[in-house]
Amino acid sequence: MTDHRELSAGLRAAVRGEVDFTATARALTTMDASNYRRVPLGVVAPRDADDVAAALSVCRTYGVPVVPRGGGTSIAGQATGTGVVLDFTRHMNRLLSLDPQARTAVVQPGLVLDRLQEAAAPHGLRFGPDPSTHSRCTLGGMIGNNSCGSHSVAWGTTADSVRELAVVTPRGERLRPGRDGAGAPAGLRDLVDGELARLRTGFPDLPRRISGYAVDALLPEKGADVARSLCGSEGTLAVLTEAVVDLVRAPRARALAVLAYADESGAAQAAAGLLPYRPLTVEGMAADLVPFGADLPRGGAWLFVETGGDTQAEARAGAETIVRAADVLDSLVVTDPARQRALWRVREDASGTATRMPDGTEAWPGWEDCAVPPARLGAYLRDFRALMADHGLRGTPYGHFGDGCIHVRIDFDLLTAPGVARFRRFSEELADLVVAHGGSLSGEHGDGRARAELLPRMYGAETVALFERVKALWDPDDLLNPGMLVRPAPLDAGLRFSVLPREPVDVAFGYPADGGDFPAAVRRCVGVAKCRTTSVSGPAVMCPSFRATGEEQHSTRGRARLLHEMLAGELVTDGWRSTEVRDALDLCLSCKGCRSDCPVGVDMATYKAEFLHHHYAGRRRPAAHHTMGRLPEWLGWVGRTRSAGAVNALASVGPLADVAKRLGGIAGEREIPRVAGETFTRWWRGRGGPLGEGKPVVLWPDTFTEHLSPSVGRAAVRVLEAAGLRVVLPPTLRLTGRPVGDARSRSALSLLTARRGRVCCGLTYISTGRLDRARTVLRRTLDLLEPVLATDAPLVVLEPSCAAALRTDAPELLHDDPRAARLAARVLTFAETLERHAPDWTPPVLDRPVTGQTHCHQHAVLGEDPDRRLRAAAGLTGDLAGGCCGLAGNFGFEEGHYEVSRACAEDRLLPSVREAPEGAVVLADGFSCRTQLEQLAGVRGRHLAEVLAAALENT
């Protein structure tokens, strides 16, 4: 039995890169994007080929297997292992050179595909294959799996783009596999010479044959291409350290023809007929995977057919030719690049969207990418549908219809013994069906744990025995990724769900989308790793902490993996008290970006609040949980005692402020925000309360507007009243008699029987995991709001984070109180209120550009279309940046978070302000965003209400 300490010490002595045998490192690599789980001994991040050779030598000495790993997005389980995982994303992630004339690039295995595409684009070049995970998958992983992507009908698989490799064999030999037999290990040529007949007849001829080893690439008539034969070997033969890849000329212009059909069988039947027109893509998907409101022509299924050309007119002409040739219900030709990107996002997100059936049932990979000859795709899909029906299973096929490659997530029951048995029976019968149609068990993602056991059904026992001989030549000690492709484990063994608890876990939130089941909520993360994207465009937010640190444990996926292992209890053994989970969640900004940007809707902000609630139950909490977590209480006390001036004066004295920050767990680099001398509600009472006779709207006096930015509240009142609305404030008394809606009462009887209080969304309590207190605060709020909820008046919430808390956190935390859902339905943003309740009002026109950032909670929960329309009506031109400001309520103020907070701001917010045109209006609806701008850039951001109110005053 291996001594883990000796192995770890031996690796540390031999390797210059990081060696990590902690529970955290191991937990982060137990899974990829598949249904499988294997627990490694440790993780090594090599710095170069010498480190790789050294790690292999040590592991060979101890008899410990090695698994190379890239982005960890493999869907068949081949990026997991029980020995040492080699993580190439940390150091061996560079583009070494790019030759535009030769159209080649030299890359390291950990290089993310998008980084190569960005470097090639200025030369009019690109790497041909482009999986939907292009923003986080690595070139090493693509070579290991022979990845393809949506443009394979034009540019083929990764194997078609590989010219030469540099590898280290398990016994330390360094080879450069290429064409004409270059870089072959001893004995490989003799093996090929002895099996020529089998190699020429035993391998299906179709564009997406990925299953098994590509031994037929070693045939003399195919150029004896050793590099090509290694593509798709899933890290089982040698460890890649460098690759020379071919680039292709990118079309200068593109057009997208969206062709609508009644169902996916009709779309599949039509796909092969479009190939003679030489499209760049022929992608298919059905309505079940399309979000509501997507801009698609009418139909039940669609083909996305992309064409290219030197000019826009040429690309469009190609698309229109395809539309005329296709027999469609409806069609759409798109040439605008932004609109094309939006449509492609619908397709790319399908790998996550498909993990939930329309009724919310879980669906899983396993038969994610079978491929058949394109001309047989329609017939295959009909048989496939019939087989699923026979087994009582459901799934929605989509994918690369032009190549005959189908992706599908199926609602397997992988939690019970009968369900797993049905999974096995279905897999065996589907393998036979694919073979009957002349297909490949894998058409893109490899065999891994999911299909390797079934390879004899596709190739026969003798060809599989040939694969074993190939493995023995490259890896005689069976060191590399054992159990993949040859001598595999059963396809129903090692399922990642088997370790999760079967009994319900006692939790505070309701998790309505997951049936109240916290493990089901954690299972949402299937590992597609969109959260590991290092750069985002448009309004996207997820995942700012990963972009700031580059560390897996600070990605949404990494945190979900640690929660999974916490529930499993094998690696992370102390449950809710886990320090590993606590430390990973510490840098979660609770931005809620994953709630909208994650294709499967992982909501890490809620999981974090849940964890903190349990982790600190009955224990001493960090000081910041008391200072910032109880902010409404402290500021309420300041407001009642009218001591804002004294508090501000003390905070302006450096030594006193430093002591206060140290005691309060506040970052020393931060300035303490000034408290307003006059609260918003005091100003409200001074003006005499509501004015006008229009439709009443209830303006929510959140803590930030009330005590820190009352100017926002005053501005909102000015604009709402100018729009003809009657602004009132929520009750501050819970009355037994006649309701009041203007925060004042003159009824002596009411005063005698009433209880005084103020509404609060509970945000600061939720973000610090003080969920019992949050529930108390929200129930008090609901008590106060009962008179309002009895009317049809909307609740206008100016602070996006408070609006998001009321709309989502409140009903999920008070899932047993129907009033919370009624409250959530009433919550409107400032722009929504004007659009719905003052549709005829025209705002003043400013004719100025805008800059700034859409609040992360606005993007993730509330939606921003009404804001865009209001800005456009006011002549405020341009788009706001996405991402998160990095302050994120209490996060950026907490001790130890300053550098990450600043890095998040430098990701999108601060550059957008620096690069803004002269005279641009800096918009920031959130108090955190405005504070971050002021403290890091010396820039004053304004709420949209303030901008419009100032324009009204000037008019």
Image (spheres, grey):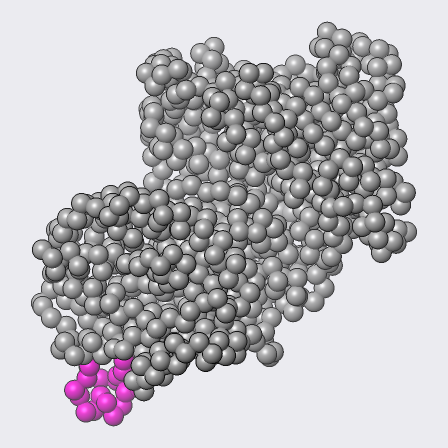
Q: Residue at x 88, y 51 (%)?
A: 2
Quarter occupied by residue 713 = bottom left
| Residue drawn at 61 percent across, 53 percent down | 553
Provide residue 662's location: percent of width, then percent of height: 52, 76
Relative vertical location of residue 304 with respect to residue 639 in this rendering, above or below: above
The structure residue drawn at horizontal position 88% and vertical position 19%, both measured from the top left corner, is 187
Between residue 451 and residue 838, name the one nearer to us. Answer: 838
Q: Nearer the viewer, residue 385 or 152?
A: 152
Question: In the rendered structure, does residue 738 fall within the stretch colored magenta?
Answer: yes
Instruction: List the single residue furthest toward the front.
Output: 654
50 or 111: nearer the viewer: 50
- Coordinates of residue 684 in the picture (x, y in percent): 19, 75
Q: Quadrant of the C terminus?
A: bottom left
| Magenta-colored stretch includes residue 625 | no
Q: 731 left or right of 128?
A: left
Q: What secondary structure do most residues of the magenta stretch adopt?
A: loop
Which residue is at a point 45% across and 51% down the rendered structure image?
906
Q: Check the image and name the residue furthest to the top.
A: 221
- Number of numbered discs on residues: 0
Pinpoint residue 544: horizontal percent, then vertical percent: 49, 51
Q: Is residue 636 left or right of residue 457?
A: left
Q: Is residue 403 something one can see in this rendering?
A: no
- Seen in the picture, residue 175 relative to 811 is either above or below; the reply is above
Question: In the rendered view, does 81 fall on the left or right side of 413?
Answer: right
Percent of width and height locating residue 929:
37, 59
Position of 283 with respect to 622 (left or right) is left
Query: Can you say whether 361 is above or below 887 in the image?
Result: above
Please give the range of residues in magenta. Answer: 732-757
Between 192 and 172, the one nearer to me in the picture: 172
